[in-house]
Amino acid sequence: MSIEKKSTINLSLPAVEIREVRTNSITGYDGKAKDLVEQSHSGGLKDIKRSFQQCAGCSIEKAACMTVLIQDAAVIEHGPIGCSTCFHEYNFTYSVNADLRGVAHPTQRKVFSTNLQEKDTVYGGVQKLANTIRDVYKRTHASVIFVLSTCAAAIIGDDIESTCDEAEDELGIPIVPIVCEGFRSRVWTTGFDAAYHGIARKLIDKPAKRRNDVINVINFWGSDRFSDWFAPFGCKPNYITPYATVNTLRKSGEAAATVQACSTLGSYLAAVLEKEFGVPEIETAPPYGIAQTDRWFRALGKILHKEDVAEEIIAQKKEKYLPKIEALREKLKGKTAYVTGGAAHGQALLAVLGELGVNAVGASIFHHDAIYDSGRQEDDQLKKAVEDYGDISNYRVCSKQEYELANSLGKLRPDVLLARHGGMTLWGAKYGIPSLLVGDEHLSMGYEGIIDYGERILDTIENDEFVRNLQKHAINPYTKWWLMQRPDYFFEK
């Protein structure tokens, strides 16, 4: 079943439409997961603002995430140098995860800042940007230069688009403006869309042919699980964008299909590849949990016209892995868990917990997309998790508000906290709750992923001495008054 929605893809415009408008995304909700799904698909979902916020994310960080990790790219942050503080994180990420992708000689990332000063906000920064682009090209000879806009540059009205176009004509390489200043959207994952919008406008070529042996994989930096999965179909993955090159990005319009590791990340680009380049998007959510992995392989077989191959893979993998999954269920019987993370991946972990027989007592998910750019309900990870494994009573959309997470954990006291983002496991540890952070989003995918992730959960629960000792000495910064309130206390009624 499809949701009626008007396509908002327009590559002639420099900026992507924000998620609040395009996908009716929200950052505030407290209730049952089932009710959230129903409101999302009925068109009745409304965002809830807070009268107090402790922190927030920024779109530029997400845009950097998708551009800094391209192997032969250089990235310029056009703004005050403080806005580039996230860049060092992706230099580190590139290095430590390169082995997962078989990158033999990882190089230092090429990241720069125009370092706008107070006088630049008066007289303008475009000349400084133009000089920086020339200097960066002279130093790096990169195959592409991305220019990420900041709030300061947008406020003073710097014409980044024209500056990049002029530099592109002069240097003969793509100079790609990414419109990702933080104040454009309260949903910072719009930064992913902004990066992909620029890549689609400037780098992806219209296909001269169709390659039946290549499948696009929109992902972060997880391990290479897809090569083994695609091999029986006679295909190989084209990863977008971590560890991609300009050449592999250019040819992504030739692929036979597009799949995603995370629907939050890939929603926009998958729709662009389908609408503008004719690359069909697989018509189902990513493969987390047995039920969804079955659907995923069947959808992939259908799109490749190899349904028989898909059924063989499903049968072989179930024969191999189901007994091991059942053994893990026995060991984890009666355990409870709490999940915090980004939207689609956090929802995917709920499916993994359901498969392992662990009761998900609650979740704090950073935002929620009412629909995805495809408009298909089949792509809705939360809807599938609720249908397959049941409702989650304490489901929260919390926009990284750690005071709300601390409140919820203090009341529910699960056996384990599962987190996707660094810094969040601290709150479980302070309560003496064993806490697991896994950076490889591919670890829990597929049938084998249930075992890999289940073993990590079991190991985390059984080795709890550190967090129990930490609890005795940890200081909770929040008052007893706050911890007695409902987590939605600061929601505007």
Image: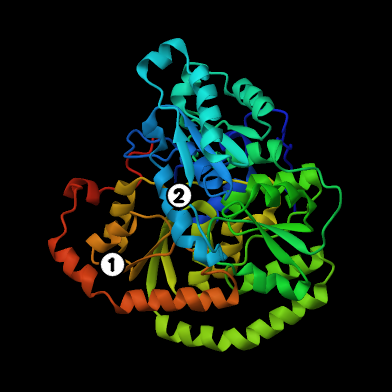
Colour mode of the rendering: rainbow
Is residue 392 among what the camera can see?
no
Q: Which mark is residue 152?
A: none
Residue 189 position within the rendered picture, expressed as x and y whole percent measured from the top left:
52, 43
Mark 2 to mark 1 CA distance (whole Å): 29 Å
Q: Residue at x 29, y 61 (%)?
A: 428
Image quadrant where residue 5 sits? top right
Q: Residue at x 78, y 54 (%)?
A: 280
Residue 140 position within the rendered picture, expressed as x and y whole percent measured from the top left:
53, 40
The answer to whether 100 is drawn above or below residue 266 in the figure is: below
Residue at image mark 1: 433
What is the crowding at mark 1: few (fewer than 14 residues within 10 Å), some, or many (at least 20)?
many
Which quadrant holds the N terminus? bottom right
Of helix, strand and loop, which one carries label 1? loop
Of helix, strand and loop, which one carries label 2? helix
Taking 318 as reference, is 26 left or right? left
What is the crowding at mark 2: few (fewer than 14 residues within 10 Å), some, or many (at least 20)?
many
Name the residue nearer the viewer: 458 or 136.
136
Q: Which mark is residue 90?
A: 2
